[in-house]
Image (spheres, rainbow, N blue to C red):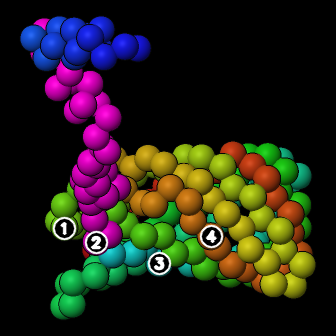
Amino acid sequence: MNKPLASIVCAAAIASGTLPVVAADLAPAQSYSDSGARNGVKIGYLDCTIAGGAGYILGSSKEVNCAFKSTIDGEPVDDYSGAMRKLGVDLGFTTEGRLIWAVLAPTAGYHHGSLAGLYQGASAEATVGLGVGANVLAGGTSGSIHLQLLSLQGQVGLNIAAAGTSMTLTSVN
């Protein structure tokens, strides 16, 4: 482009106000990230013991006893009981297992019984001696306090499972 034509284009851009917009668009974008606002604040964890038992070809049902432990020192433990049910392939047996979930909230508050409710999703397990499982469960009754979406569990036995899963928790205290 020759100099007189470039001068005219620049003058027209400045006069119309498009040059500052173009310059602003070329500036590096600044981003603000507040993970607490979207992902919640970890307010504690739910430590669950899953009863041992046998899986039947189309599923299983096992008792669950859980305790919510706050990250704040001196807060009382909140106990829950319930059942974990699987519908799908669940073959074999396991002894007592353990499952730990992080508990998240949009703020640092927690109220007694907040984790009671129905959680639904899927799980997969593989156990030969020592075994592991993964659960993806969402739900509950309170929309503001929830369990982390993915959890891992450990158990002993001989088992393979891939099933739709539901867990019901009821406050004990």
Q: Which of pointers 3 and 4 indicates the residue nearer the eye?
A: 4
Residue type beneath disc 2: Ile
Q: Which mark, by number, is residue 108?
A: 1
Residue 66 visible in the displayed image: no
Residue linked to disc 4: 152
Separation of residues labelled 4 and 2 (CA atoms): 19 Å
Q: Which mark, by number, is residue 43?
A: 2
Looking at the image, residue 132 sits to the left or right of residue 30; the answer is right
Separation of residues labelled 2 and 3 (CA atoms): 13 Å
Residue type beneath disc 1: Ala
Residue at 28%, 79% in the rendered image? 70
Residue type beneath disc 4: Leu
Residue nearest the viewer, comparing 11 with 121: 11
Q: Which residues are magenta?
A: 16-43
How many labels, in total? 4
Q: Which mark, by number, is residue 47?
A: 3
